[in-house]
Every structure is written in C-alpha cells, then in structure tokens.
Amino acid sequence: MDNKFSELKSQIEKAESIIIFSHVSPDGDTLGSNLALSLMIEKYFNKKPVSAFVGSLPSIYSYLPEFDRFIDVQSIPRDKKYDLAIAVDVASKDRLVSGTNIYDNAVYKVNIDHHKTNIGYGDLNIIDANAACVGVILFKIFKEWNLDIPKDVARCIYTSLLTDTGGFKYESTTPETFMLAADLVRLGVSPTYEFRACYETKPQAMVQFQAYVVSNAVFYDNGKIAFAKITRSDMSKFNATDDYTEGIVEVLRTSKNVEIAAILKETKDGYTKVSLRSKTVDLIPIVIEFGGGGHTFAAGCTIKKPIAVAFDKLLRRVQNELR
Ligand SMILES: [Mn+2]
C-alpha cells in the first residue's frame, strides 16, 4: 500500500476530531472531494468530520449528497483545535483565508491536491499533479484501503471529475479519466442526471447576467485576447451572487481567435479577482506574478488594485506574453 495512503488512514483512525477544508470560491472538485471524503470517514471510521467552506457556498452544487454538511469556517471559534485537518484541492494555504488559523492549529495537517504549484504545506502531502481532479486521488485512496464506494460517494467524485475536466474536455482528460468515469457509472452514477444538475439549473437571472457580461467583453490584438469586467454595480443590478460569474470565462474562450480570456471581478473590498483561461499559453508564470496559482490553462489571482488599474496591468502583461 502506498505509504502516504496508509499514513492518512492511521491518522483518521487516531483522530477524534476531524475537519475537512474546501478552498475559497469553491468549485465542484473541492466541494465534491470534501463530501466524498467526509462520507467515507463517517461510513467506515465511524466519526463525523466537519466539512468547512470559506467565503460563500455556491448553491449550484446543492444537488450533491449531504450538501447541508457544509458549515462556514467563520462559525468555528478561531482557537478551536482539531486532531486532524485535511485540505482538499487547496493549492496554497492562503486559499483557506480565515480558515488558515484553524488549519494551522490542528495537531496533524493533511494536504490532498493536484495543483502543480502546491508547495506541500501539510504534515502529510498527497499531491498528484497528473490527476485530473482531487476526486481521482481520493478514488485511488479508497481503492487502496479496500473499501467499497457507495453511490453517494461515487456521485461526489463524479462531480469532481466532471467539473475539473470541464465536462471531459480539458487537457487533463486522459484514458484514466474515462476509466474512472466508467467505474463511477457502474457504481450507479447517472451522467445525464449529474450533468443537468450541475450545468442546467442556473437561475434565469444568472443566464441573463452572464450574457450581459459577455456582450460587454472587449477583444484585443485581433481577437486573441478577450477581457470582461464585472463591477459591484453590475452585480447588484442583477442581484448576482458570487457564483453567477462561474463559467463566463469559458464562454469567452469559445471565440475562434481567442488565446487568452480573462474575467476581472471587483471584490467587496475594492480589489480585483481574476479568472484566466487559455488555449495554448501557460498561464502559471502570469498569475504567479500577481500572487495567484492554478493550472496551465486555467488559473487565477487576486490583484490588490482597483478594477480599472488591474485591468490595464493584466492586459499589458497578457499582451507581452503573446508577443
Ligand atoms: Mn481541482
């Protein structure tokens, strides 16, 4: 058995209190993985971990089994000491935001991830940069532990896989991806149901908000660059919650000439949250300069500048990259 996998098992066995963290601006992978691990620990180790989120919890994932388990990290006393803290899909510790304290406070810290920028901040680091999603890693772990995976857990892992491969279309999609998908479908997952639940249940206002943002996007350098801005007043005009912006950047990338697409969103504290996508350009060097991280073709950062300033800075940097 992989040493790290058995170490994780013995830490779970030893721990009386366990907390599992998802990253800020949670996506399907970090939420699906969190629930999958939580449900397995409950079923086979007979203890109930706390599933924590940071910031806001996107309601689009409320179709996931036991979604109600998620609690806001802010509701946990900051000096609370858990025996075991596990971060799933958390590329760097600053993505735990206000949860960092509680994570650091834990007796033993685990870091399960697939971002190649992850520096291994835990006591135990299970990092596989080739895994399409953290769900893939968890599936391997559960198999190594010789545990049967119930349908609920399979559904959570399927959402990890579906969302982090962009519906089986990103570069991370490999034969292994489809093998895992096949295994999960055999365990009872319905691809049709999960796809509809995940992608076709947007509130009407969200569809209209996204169309508005896309129609106001600006294209540069013969359409190779697409940038769209979202201000707080755009958000309030549509009564938009944070999850309303999910997926817009992928729409910009569908334009034939686009090499790099970016969505810049004004945050509550007046900074700029950036989500970048590219077709062939490695985004990591760009986002690193702004203190961000992510994957080769899908990355992000928060620029601590007002949106207009951040827009110009990022545009110049992206233009340089393409020249
Ligand atoms: Mn992920």
Image (cartoon, rainbow, N blue to C red):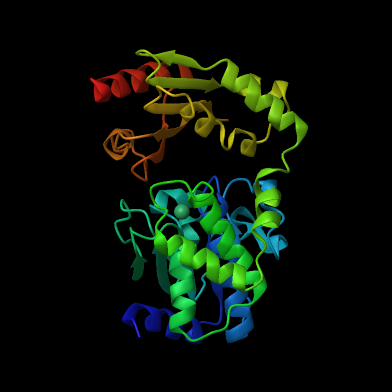
Taking the spot 44% from the left edge, 21% from the top edge, the residue there is 226
| Residue that sits furthest to the right in the current view | 204
Task: Give the percent coordinates (x, y) of residue 145.
Answer: 46, 85
Q: Quadrant of residue 305?
A: top left
The residue sitting at 56% across, 77% down in the picture is 17
Asked if residue 247 is positioned above or below residue 60 in the image, the reply reads: above
Q: Which residue occupies the extreme left position in the image?
A: 323
Q: Is residue 271 visible?
A: no
Of 304 and 142, nearer the camera is 142
Examine the rendered structure and indicate whether residue 223 appears above or below residue 139: above
Image coordinates of residue 143 in percent, x first then y, are 47, 80
Q: Is residue 245 left or right of residue 104?
A: right
Q: Residue at point 63% right, 27% down? A: 210
- Examine the rendering and report whether any part of residue 21 can be seen: yes
Quarter residue 189 falls in? bottom right
Residue nearest the observer in this picture, 313 or 210 = 210
33 with respect to 56 (left or right): left
Q: x, y (%) of residue 230?
A: 56, 23
Q: Residue at x 48, y 72 (%)?
A: 139
